[in-house]
Amino acid sequence: MGQVILGVGDYGASNNPTDDVKTFALGSCVSVILLDPKTKTVGMAHVALPDSSINKAKAAEKPGYFADTAIPALLAEMTKYGCHKKGKGMVVKLCGGANVMDTNDTFQIGKRNALAIKKILWAHGMGAIAEDLGENFSRTVTISVGAGQVTLSSPGRPNWQL
């Protein structure tokens, strides 16, 4: 069993049924999960910020960091596994977007990330069928490629499925 580990701003995909795709400690970041039932491929991006216009150089270097560059990059990555280039037929799930450090709710990075991602998905004709967004705790996300099952965990809480 292999693991595809994604850090902040990373994206990746696998169609190996023994793999897990995993990212740790989503706070205000949002995980965009794409599951393609036709090719049995799972893809995920760990998005940190909503808009790449604040740092074009970083977006070019690490497109998964920003919502507006992460989704096209993830879709392009998944085409390497035979998935439709525009995401047709894919199942979308979202998680993260918590408010873990902004106790005054000043910046609302998690909410802004989630909204930006949803707008970009809608522009691609896609929408999430399941989401676990917001609250005030971080999440670790593990996707079993073979089962297509998304498991979330957080310290002090029992694991749950999305």
Image (cartoon, rainbow, N blue to C red):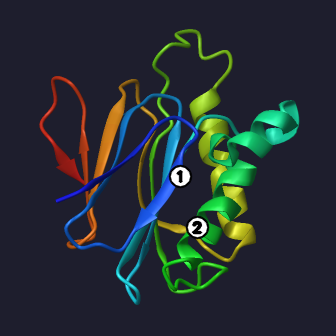
N-terminal of the two: label 1 or label 2? Answer: 1
Image quadrant assignment for residue 135: top left
Q: Quadrant of the N terminus?
A: bottom left
119 or 53, nearer to the observer: 53
Query: What type is the residue that disc 1 sits on?
Result: Tyr
Position in image of residue 121 (x %, y %): 65, 65
Q: Is residue 156 above or below residue 64?
A: above
Local packing at callout 1 (Cα closer than 10 Å; few below 14, some 14-19, many 20+) is many
Q: Residue furthest bottom?
A: 38
Position in image of residue 50 (x %, y %): 71, 40
Position in image of residue 151 (x %, y %): 23, 52
31 or 21, nearer to the observer: 21
The structure residue drawn at horizontal position 67% and vertical position 80%, both measured from the top left corner, is: 86
Residue that badge 2 annotates: 77
Position in image of residue 79 (x %, y %): 58, 78
Total numbered badges shown on the rendered structure: 2
Q: Is residue 68 above or below residue 147?
A: above
Residue 11 bears which disc, if any?
1
The structure residue drawn at horizontal position 71% and vertical position 60%, both measured from the top left corner, is: 120
